[in-house]
Amino acid sequence: MTLLVDKKGAIAKLYDADHRVLPLSKRVYVIIDKNMKVIYRKDMGFALLENQTETLIREIDDKIQ
């Protein structure tokens, strides 16, 4: 899920993705399993995850049985 608008920052705060100083969110990758448990979280600040698609698919394959 990509959040494009979170005017009051509630969702960003919920996932600890809000920036403490600037009025914007950090880039945080989160994978949630079918039981709504966070099984992967990577805070990249403002950078992109290297090999984003491959990395996320590998994490899903490794953690979801």
Image (cartoon, grey):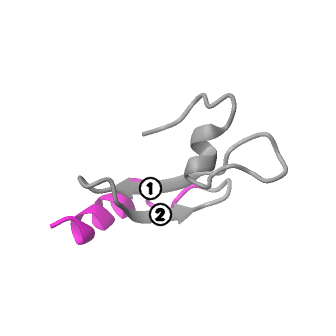
Q: Residue at x 79, y 40 (%)?
A: 23
Task: Say if 51 sits above or below 13 in the image.
Answer: below
Q: Nearer the viewer, residue 34 or 43?
A: 34
Residue 41 marker:
2
Kindly state the secondary structure of the residue where label 2 is placed: strand
Question: In which quadrant of the rendered image does the N terminus lie?
Answer: top left
Picture coordinates of residue 47 (x, y %)?
A: 64, 56
Question: In which quadrant of the rendered image does the C terminus lie?
Answer: bottom left
Label 2, residues with CA under 10 Å away: few <14, some 14-19, many ≥20:
few
Q: Which residues are magenta?
A: 48-65
Picture coordinates of residue 3 (x, y %)?
A: 53, 35
Decide: marks 1, 2 in contact (CB < 8 A)? yes
Task: Say if 63 sits above or below 2 in the image.
Answer: below
The Cα–Cα distance between marks 1 and 2, rounded to whole angstroms, is: 5 Å
The amino acid at mark 1 is Val
Q: Name the residue tied to disc 1.
A: 30
Q: Residue at x 82, y 45 (%)?
A: 22
Determine if the magenta segment contains residue 54.
yes
Instruction: Kindly give the residue lying farthest to the left in the view shown.
Output: 65
